Amino acid sequence: MFILRNYRSDSAKLQAFENQADLEAAEFSDADYRIAKAGDLLELYVKTNDNSPLMELLKQARAYYLDDLDIVQTAPEVNALMAWLMDDYGVDYRGESLEATADRLGDIDIEADSDRYTDLIFHLKDAVERLYDLEMDEW
């Protein structure tokens, strides 16, 4: 959980919080943006130009959610985080499941004898598992 301090300026700073209670207790102004869940981050991401200095801070916050997808509460949020990550890698993912994309990228890495997509593949497989867990929770 985070607060982006002065998020509309070039001097924005990302402040992290250990838990929801600490985030809610923090002082907050109109110049700040509160990120209490992945959806809050994604809302700001879609409004932010790729060349904005803010994008680096958003990617730092994204890493928090990618490192523990269990805190991402909805399938659309999981899918959106993965779409954003794949976009950073320049990977076309339209029309393909996350699992199929991971398999395709694994094949590319094997053919090229590289590990270019290793981190992305790990996150994709983690996302597939999280989506499965969310689906099971609905039963």
Image: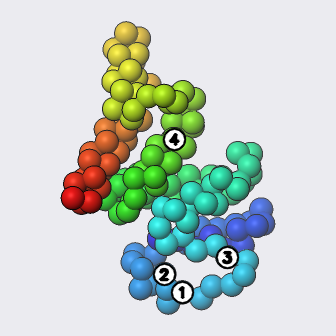
Say whether disc 4 or disc 1 marks the residue closer to the N-terminus.
1
Q: Where residue 83 is drawn, which disc sits there?
A: 4
At x 40%, y 75%, the residue is 18
Helix, strand or loop at label 3? It is: loop
How far apart are the two marked residues, 2 and 1, measured between alpha carbons?
Answer: 5 Å
- For marks 2 and 4 on the same chain, the one whose residue lies earlier in the sequence: 2
Instruction: Identify the image quadrant of residue 73.
Output: bottom left
Residue shown at the point (40%, 23%) measured from the top left: 105
- Where residue 104 appears, as percent x and y from the top left, is 38, 20
User: Where residue 91 sits in the image (x, y, percent)?
Assistant: 53, 28
Q: Residue furthest right?
A: 9
SS for callout 2 = helix
Mark 3 → mark 1, Cα distance in angstroms: 11 Å
**Circle 3 residue:** 32
Q: Is residue 51 left or right of residue 20?
A: right
Q: Is residue 57 visible?
A: no
- Can you identify the residue that label 2 sits on? 23
Q: Amino acid at mark 2?
A: Leu
Q: Evaluate if marks 2 and 1 touch, with contact meaning CB atoms under 8 Å apart.
A: yes
